């Protein structure tokens, strides 16, 4: 994702006006979500009870809860919390769902999904990011996220199927290998590269195994990158 970009429709990604306390920044973020018609009580509670600073250090609260992506280790970026809220609302998580995430990043999104009652398997290319996320999970008391070191675009180590799948980046083709892992009535949220633009996209699988694709508007997430790193 490019800096300063949010996947929320018509979001200008404006910087906050001045220093805020952690509680004030979080409260304003929750109010902003409500003003954008995001009223799912479980999702809002998950954000309220999970301090983002556990997962992304070195930024003031007004940056942590603004509509901008933030740099993290290994040259990666953490998706802004407004986009996370939108993606997870589309994912329609329920307690007991088994979720596959491609791109662990800071681990904050996976932790929010765990707070919603999901069991999350998350693939990440960088060992450093996995170690940092695991430390944050321990501090937050998160036990239902399983980070996996691997190239999620090339091969999944577990022959599992999932109720929900979320791809933290864009692909130029329909994600058929992931759709094959999606259970009937499952939902996949990802991003499609279409020419010079990227579109937030939802796939919903019916009882017969057919997946219907729905465009959910413009997205600013960058392409998913494959390959396993051996240094970081």
Image: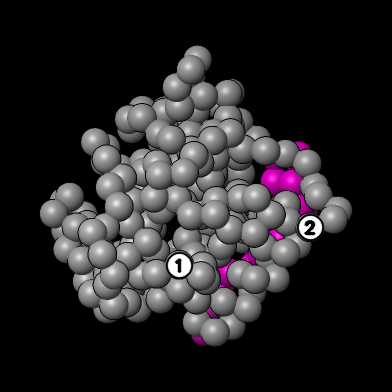
Does 223 sit above or below residue 189?
above
Residue of label 2: 232
Q: Quadrant of the C terminus?
A: bottom right
Name the image quarter holding residue 185. top left
Q: Could you say which is closer to the camera, residue 184 or residue 33?
A: 33
Q: Judging from the image, what secondary structure is the residue with disc 1 in?
A: loop
Q: Where's residue 64, x and y in %?
A: 39, 64
Q: Is the stretch drawn in magenta largely helix, strand or loop?
A: loop
Q: Which residue is mark 1?
A: 59
Determine the residue positioned at 80% across, 47% down: 228
The residue under the point 49% across, 28% down is: 192
Secondary element under disc 2, as helix, strand or loop, is: loop
Res 205 → quadrant: top left
Q: Nearer the viewer, residue 161 or 69?
A: 69
- Does 142 appear in magenta? yes
Span colored in magenta: 141-158
Give left or right: position of 231 versus 196: right
């Amino acid at each position: 994702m490019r800096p300063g970009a949010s996947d929320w429709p018509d979001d200008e990604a404006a910087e906050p006006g001045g220093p805020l306390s952690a509680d004030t920044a979080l409260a304003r973020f929750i109010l902003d979500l409500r003003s954008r018609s995001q009223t799912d009580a479980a999702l809002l509670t998950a954000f309220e009870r999970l301090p983002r600073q556990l997962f992304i250090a070195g930024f003031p609260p007004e940056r942590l809860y603004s509509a901008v992506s933030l740099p993290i280790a290994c040259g990666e970026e953490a998706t802004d919390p407004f986009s996370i809220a939108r993606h997870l609302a589309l994912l329609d998580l329920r307690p007991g769902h088994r979720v596959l995430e491609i791109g662990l990043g800071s681990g904050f999104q996976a932790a929010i999904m765990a707070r919603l009652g999901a069991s999350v398997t998350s693939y990440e290319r960088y060992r450093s990011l996995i170690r940092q996320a695991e430390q944050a999970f321990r501090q937050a008391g998160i036990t239902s996220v399983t980070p996996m070191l691997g190239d999620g675009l090339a091969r999944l180590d577990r022959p599992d199927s999932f109720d929900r799948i979320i791809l933290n980046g864009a692909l130029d083709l329909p994600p058929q290998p992931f759709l094959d892992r999606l259970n009937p009535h499952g939902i996949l949220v990802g991003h499609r590269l279409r020419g010079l633009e990227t579109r937030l996209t939802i796939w919903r699988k019916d009882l017969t195994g057919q997946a219907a694709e729905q465009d959910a508007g413009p997205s600013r997430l960058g392409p998913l990158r494959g390959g396993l790193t051996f240094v970081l």
